[in-house]
Image (tube, helix red, strand yellow):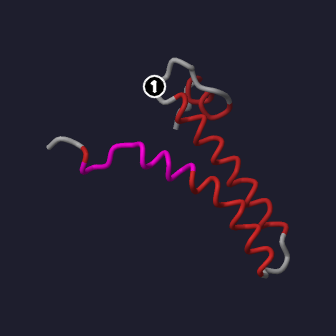
Amino acid sequence: MNIEKDDLDLLNGSPDPAWDYYVLWHRIQQIKAQLDRALIWISQVENQNTATDKETAVLLRKPWDRLDEILNGLPDDDDEPA
């Protein structure tokens, strides 16, 4: 698989601001960072208990809600003309 310079920019940096999906890309990157923080938290917890479950839920709620907001703003297959 050949990775072009533009692909590397998307993987390692920030895409062209004129790109149609520029804002969506950044929103998803922010969600990904929040999920990464949750994964780090989980990896550091030795024992699962009510307190750690609550903290995990807090860490996951915001990215979940933001992703749900994005998904609700995108057209469904049912919204497409036949």
Question: What residue do we see at 25% from left, 45% from top?
Answer: 79
Question: What residue do we see at 74% from left, 72% from top?
Answer: 54
Q: Residue furthest left?
A: 82
Rendered position, 3 above or below 77: above
Rendered position, 45 above or below 67: below
Rendered position, 22 above or below 64: above
Q: Give the residue number, with chain letter if any, for mark 1.
A: 20
Quadrant that contains the C terminus: top left
74 within the magenta span: yes
x, y percentage for residue 12? 67, 32
| Secondary structure at numbered mark 1 | loop
Estimate how packed mark 1 is, as few (under 14), some (14 to 19) or many (20 or more) residues with alpha carbons within 10 Å: few
Magenta region, residue range = 66-78
Question: What residue do we see at 54% from left, 28% from top?
Answer: 22
x, y percentage for residue 4? 55, 26
Question: What residue do we see at 23% from left, 43% from top?
Answer: 80
Q: Which of 54 and 37 is in front in this view?
A: 54
User: Amino acid under label 1?
Assistant: Asp
x, y percentage for residue 78? 24, 51
